[in-house]
Image (spheres, rainbow, N blue to C red):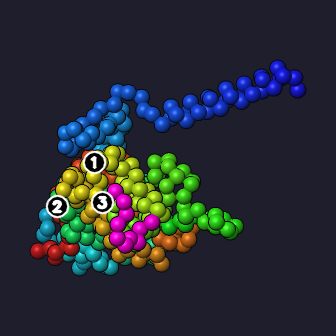
């Protein structure tokens, strides 16, 4: 090939490479205007950055479905009229029917009652979806009664996670990744495969297993300039911790400064109140995964299990879906007292 041909080929490669790099860089930025809101101490750059176009789309997607009018807690109890009502038997027939119709709207508006019930025998537990739904009702009651430190009076309903879909749009499974042939690179520990789970970074993407299912120590940042004393934390733990932190940031659509003062991440006295709320939230998610979802493993069919055969689990994005408060703090819970805790018998 002539010198001219070589120069032309190299120039073409440079143009293509430059174009791809430009696309990659532009993709990582958002078109202005971008709005900022002071969230913490002045002079510490604790400002939350929002894109008004993204917020508009999120608000449009956070509209609650219409609520059926409440019915009196009088008359015969549903548990005495219908068979096999194990959780809501204390409701009146009217209350029970209203909640069932609402759940259909929240979870399976297209599939209808038949998604969970054998319509020829409504008392049957033959469909796994009915068994799961019963346990999920108990989980919702548990969240609203025992985790007010995280959900406060806003609480949750089935719609908080499902948004009109039989399966929530965000779930996760244990995923250690494929093992390498051997040697120093025998396993990549779930790293170096950029995914949207951790903001397209190469941090470990299976942070859920150690922190949202198991109770591994999240506190890895040193409080001194040089390491002191005995520590069990290592670089692998640190990378997994930052994977979790990025997940929380992405799930809530906020910066690190939503919870932390970046002049001293580890100091609780300089952190915002949201850090305490998040602390309880991590423990709540861990409890829900261990006490509810993991224990449904034998109920789920193989198609609903993960690559290692584990049950589906939830994380911060399951409820928040990119918003600092699920559904921007809108709640239907006040209209459904039966979801605020264990049901008392109807009078």
Indicate which disc, 3 or 1, sits on the residue closer to the N terminus.
3
Q: Which mark is in front, 2 or 1?
A: 1
Q: Give, as a single range, the part of the protein colored magenta.
A: 224-234
The quadrant holding residue 315 is bottom left
Q: Secondary structure at mark 3?
A: loop
Q: Secondary structure at mark 1?
A: loop
Left or right: 264 with respect to 314? left
The crowd level at tag 3 (other Cα within 10 Å; few <14, some 14-19, many 20+) is: few
Position of residue 300 measured from the top left corner of the image (x, y, whole percent): 48, 72
Disc 2, disc 3: CB below 8 Å? Answer: no
Residue designated by label 3: 223
Q: Residue at x 46, y 48 (%)?
A: 199
Residue designated by label 2: 71
Position of residue 215 measured from the top left corner of the image (x, y, whole percent): 37, 72
User: Residue 187 has which mark?
Assistant: none
Label 2, label 3: how far apart the Cα atoms are:
56 Å
Q: Is residue 272 visible?
A: yes
Residue designated by label 1: 263
The crowd level at tag 2 (other Cα within 10 Å; few <14, some 14-19, many 20+) is: few
């Amino acid at each position: 090939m002539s010198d001219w041909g070589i120069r032309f080929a190299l120039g073409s490669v440079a143009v293509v490479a430059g174009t791809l790099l430009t696309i990659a860089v532009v993709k990582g930025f958002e078109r202005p205007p971008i709005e900022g809101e002071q969230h913490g101490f002045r002079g510490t750059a604790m400002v939350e950055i929002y894109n008004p176009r993204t917020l508009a789309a999120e608000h449009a997607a956070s509209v609650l479905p219409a609520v059926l009018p409440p019915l009196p807690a009088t008359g015969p109890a549903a548990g005495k009229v219908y068979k096999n009502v194990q959780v809501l038997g204390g409701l009146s027939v009217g209350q029970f029917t209203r909640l069932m119709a609402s759940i259909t709207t929240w979870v399976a508006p297209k599939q209808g009652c038949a998604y969970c019930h054998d319509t020829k025998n409504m008392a049957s537990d033959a469909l796994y979806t009915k068994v799961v739904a019963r346990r999920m009702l108990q989980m919702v009651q548990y969240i609203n009664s025992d985790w007010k430190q995280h959900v406060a009076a806003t609480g949750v309903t089935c719609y908080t996670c499902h948004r009109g879909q039989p399966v929530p749009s965000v779930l996760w499974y244990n995923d250690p990744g494929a093992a390498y042939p051997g040697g120093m690179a025998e396993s990549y520990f779930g790293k170096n495969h950029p995914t949207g789970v951790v903001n397209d970074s190469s941090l470990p993407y299976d942070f859920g297993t150690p922190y949202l299912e198991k109770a591994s120590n999240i506190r890895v940042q040193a409080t001194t300039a040089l390491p002191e004393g005995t520590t069990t934390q290592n670089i692998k733990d640190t990378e997994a911790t930052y994977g979790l932190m990025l997940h929380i940031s992405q799930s809530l659509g906020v910066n690190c400064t939503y919870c932390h003062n970046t002049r001293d991440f580890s100091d609780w006295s300089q952190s915002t109140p949201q850090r305490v709320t998040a602390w309880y939230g991590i423990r709540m998610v861990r409890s829900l995964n261990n006490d509810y979802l993991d224990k449904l493993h034998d109920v789920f069919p193989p198609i609903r299990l993960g690559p290692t055969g584990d049950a589906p689990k939830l994380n911060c994005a399951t409820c928040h879906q990119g918003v600092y408060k699920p559904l921007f703090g809108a709640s239907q819970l006040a209209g459904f007292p039966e979801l605020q805790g264990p049901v008392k018998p109807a009078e």
